[in-house]
Every structure is written in C-alpha cells, then in structure tokens.
Amino acid sequence: AQSVTQLGSHVSVSEGALVLLRCNYSSSVPPYLFWYVQYPNQGLQLLLKYTSAATLVKGINGFEAEFKKSETSFHLTKPSAHMSDAAEYFCAVRGNNDMRFGAGTRLTVKP
Amino acid sequence: EAGVTQFPSHSVIEKGQTVTLRCDPISGHDNLYWYRRVMGKEIKFLLHFVKESKQDESGMPNNRFLAERTGGTYSTLKVQPAELEDSGVYFCASSQVASRRDTEAFFGQGTRLTVV
C-alpha cells in the first residue's frame, strides 16, 4: 500500500526566506509523487509531480522537489518565499486507482 | 475550458437531514473521484467512477452515503441522514486516464459541509 506523511502541520517563514515542506512516502512499488497547493477558497492545484524521469522536479511558482529514494522523501522547496505562497500544501502518492494524501502543511509567510 | 466545478460551495444542515452534493468533471474525463477532508486531517478517498460505473467505493464510510453518476457525466453524493461526524470538505476530482499512474487529477474547489 502507498502512503505519505507530512512532517509539520504548520510552517512559518519570513518573506524572502527558504521554504522547506517535508514529505516522506511509503510505497511497495516505484512511487509516483505529487505536490498540490490549496489557496484560500480555491480547489487543489497541482504544483509538480515525480514520475521517475528525473529526481529533481521543477514546478510552478518557483517550487521544486527532490525525490530521494534512500530517504523515502519528496520534500518541497522554494529558495525565497513570497507573500502569495501562503496556502496549504499537500503531498500525495498515486495508489492503484486514486491519490493518497498527507494531512497537509499550512504555510504562513511573514512580512 | 471549464475546470471541475462543485455545488454548493457551502452547506449547513441539521443532523438527520439529507444533503446532495454535485460535481461536474472536466468535459471528456471518464474518471471521477470523491474525497473528503475532516477537521484538518488528511484528504481521504471515498470512491472512484469510470464513466457511470463505480470502480472502487472502498472509502465510502457507511451506507448513509450514496454516490451516483448517471450517464457518466456529472456526479452526486448524497448523505442521508447526515450525522455530526459527516462535517468536512468534500472534494471532487477528475482525470482522463486512471490506468496511467503519472496522470494527475484535477480538483474542484470543494463543498464545505457542516452538520449541526
């Protein structure tokens, strides 16, 4: 079975600081991993996905994530936080027919 | 092109009442999913339609929940009778090809259900 665990339900950073949101996965098969973002009053939007083509995946809005098999991790990073990045972020792994999500991490960006 | 749309965006009902949520997937997407997020916890899978057929309904909590997708277009999720623990945000998603594991799902904005 596939699952993901997001470490930290809340992360707060200053504007311009590094953003690091942690996700660890468990999968009995090579995983397909995703990061989604939910802005206030909106649906989930795909940020990026890992499909085994490259371990460093670049997404929208300057985000990227690195797949590390040895650490079973797929952490999301952005070098410099912007106020508009404040949202909730979800890591997900592809199951047989569906997505399995983490509990989400709410990112706050302080001016 | 319209995305996945859900109606209503919010619903407040009393315990014991019935509520029906609607989801319109992206046109041409055969696969439709329902998910639920309760009290800030993880988003949990409820069920999966391929066209009008239920492919997987293993996540449905109990028989108070009934999902339909007549004609393979829009879907409804009915909760009857609603209980307090049914409160949460119900998301709908659609995708083109479920068999490809690299295919992402496109999500609606969710319906926030509050049972009082």
Image (cartoon, coloured by chain):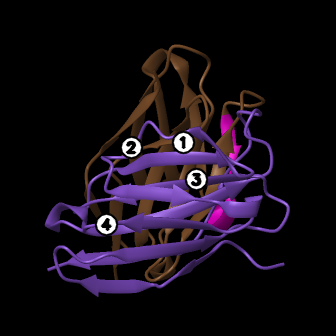
The residue lying at 49 percent from left, 41 percent from top is B57
> How many numbered discs sit on the rendered protein?
4
Span highlighted in magenta in the image = A56-62
| In front: label 1 or label 3 | 3
SS at mark 1 in the image: strand
Magenta segment includes B92: no
Label at residue A22: 2
Label at residue B80: 4
Query: Is there CB contact under 8 Å for labels 4 and 2?
Result: no
Would you name the residue on which mark 1 appears? A99
| In front: label 3 or label 4 | 4
**Tag 3 and tag 4 share a subunit:** yes
Give the residue type that dot 4 points to: Gln
Would you name the residue on which mark 3 appears? B33
From the viewer's side, name the closer residue of A66 and B78. Answer: B78
SS at mark 3 in the image: strand
Query: Is there CB contact under 8 Å for labels 1 and 3?
Result: yes
SS at mark 4 in the image: loop
Query: Is there CB contact under 8 Å for labels 3 and 2?
Result: no
From the viewer's side, name the closer residue of A79 and B90. Answer: B90
Kindly tell me whether residue A60 is visible in this rendering. Answer: yes
In primary-sequence order, the first of circles 3 and 4 is: 3
